[in-house]
Image (cartoon, rainbow, N blue to C red):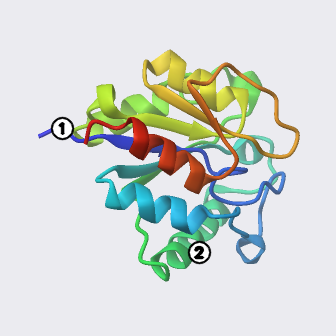
Amino acid sequence: MKRPFVFLDRDGTIIVDIPYLNDPDKIRFTDDAFAGLQTLRRLGYGLIMVTNQSGIGRGYLDEQRLTLIHDRLKRLLAEQDIFLDAIYHCPHAPDAHCHCRKPATGMLEAACRDFAVDTARSFMIGDSPVDVNLGKNFGIKTIQIRSEGFTPAGADYEADTLLEAARLIASNSPL
């Protein structure tokens, strides 16, 4: 049976954006990230993080270091009783022209192969135009977080925090 998912950007959405983060101890969550993720779970949404990590392709970190970062992120979330269904990442530099780098849809396609995703009831939440364009390219509703350096991208909705985004979903959700 298909279920709705919320696809979430990592940097600037779940955690504070630190360019080319390569130290797990520097993870800091955005305002209301825990409450937003908990609300989405209570609403019955699956949670999948999708993140461009061109730092790998550029040589700033490797897959092993990214695994350490994501393992710590998952542990910190678990301490708040929050669990992601999956994490997908694109390791390629922008000039690789791959199919997985946002706004290309490869990560969402992979998630749909791995999970029974109800795309008609799913959302993409992120802080950048790339995240909004990913959602639009995949045909799902989009919410853009107004983070530092916000550039409007024509999202279906805008929110100041992940909790506000979750509340928008709750008020617009047929669940």
Task: Name the residue that disc number 2 marks.
Answer: 72
Residue 16 location, quadrant? bottom right
Kindly state the secondary structure of the residue where label 2 is placed. Answer: helix
The image position of residue 15, as x and y in percent, is 68, 60
Disc 1 residue type (three-letter): Lys
Task: Pick the quarter of the image with the C terminus.
Answer: top left
Task: Name the residue that disc number 1 marks.
Answer: 2
Given this view, does label 1 or label 2 mark the residue nearer the observer?
1
In the displayed structure, does residue 122 sit left or right of residue 68?
A: left
Disc 2 residue type (three-letter): Arg
Q: Tag 2 or tag 1, which sits nearer the N-term?
A: 1
Query: Can you tell which mark lies on residue 77?
Result: none
Say above or below: 138 vs 33: above
Task: Pick the quarter of the image with the N terminus.
Answer: top left
In this view, the residue farthest toward the bottom is: 79
In the displayed structure, does residue 71 sit left or right of residue 38?
A: right
CB under 8 Å between discs 1 and 2: no
**Residue plotted at (28% across, 42% down):** 114
In front: 6, or 53? 6
Residue 88 visible in the displayed image: no
The image position of residue 108, as x and y in percent, is 43, 32
Say above or below: 140 vs 174: above
Residue 65 location, quadrant? bottom right
In front: 167, or 127? 167
Residue 123 visible in the displayed image: yes
